[in-house]
Amino acid sequence: MGTPEGIDVITVVISEAPYGQERAYTALRFALTALVEGEEVKIFLIEDGVFLGKKGQNPDEVPNYLELLEQCIEQGAEVKACGPCSKARGLSEEDFIEGVELATMHDLVNWVKESDNVIFF
């Protein structure tokens, strides 16, 4: 598949909440590395992963996952958060940082169909 320039499209699906385990951290590091290597990256936050995009995170003594997500956005990643998952967790569009858009399963299905690779964390 890929874009005409030979760049791969990678969709990273993150279902893990930040700071509980390291899966979300690893996912963001993977996404940022792929971006730095010139790949097109799409990040879909689902289930507890929607908390990665929540404003105001300032953890003590652990890496700030929100800063990593912001770096991904600055490097060109498109980021969507599952709308129903967010609503179920008391989050609305105003709770997310700039660059995170609420989405549906239809959006995820389209991304998967358009992607060369999909990785789930």
Image: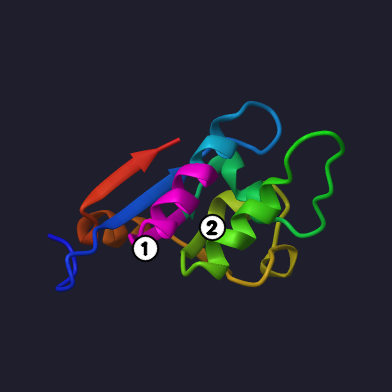
Residue placed furthest toward the top: 21
**The N terminus, quarter of image:** bottom left
Q: Residue at x 77, y 35 (%)?
A: 62
> Which type of secondary structure does the marked residue at label 2 adopt?
strand
- Badge 2 local density, few (<14 within 10 Å), some, or many (20+)? many
Q: Is residue 101 visible?
A: no
Q: Nearer the viewer, residue 20 or 109?
A: 20
Give 118 or 85, whichever is nearer the viewer: 118
Q: Secondary structure at mark 1?
A: helix
103 in magenta: no
Of residues 104 and 37, the one nearer the viewer is 37
> Which residue is painted at 28% across and 62% down in the image?
110
Q: Quadrant of residue 53?
A: bottom right
Quarter occupied by residue 23: top right
The residue carrying mark 2 is 81
**Tag 2: amino acid:** Ala
Report x, y in % for residue 81.
54, 57
Q: Earlier in the sequence, mark 2 or mark 1?
A: 2
- Cα–Cα span, label 2 and label 1: 10 Å
Compared with 94, 18 (above or below) is above
Please, what is the three-letter code of the amino acid marked with disc 1? Asp
Crowd rating for badge 1 (residues with CA inside 10 Å; few <14, some 14–19, many 20+): some
Left or right of residue 94: residue 6: left
Horizontal side of residue 109 vs 62, given as left or right: left
- The residues colored magenta run 28-43
Percent of width and height locating residue 113: 21, 57
* Residue linked to disc 1: 107
**Residue 17 in the figure: left or right of residue 111:** right
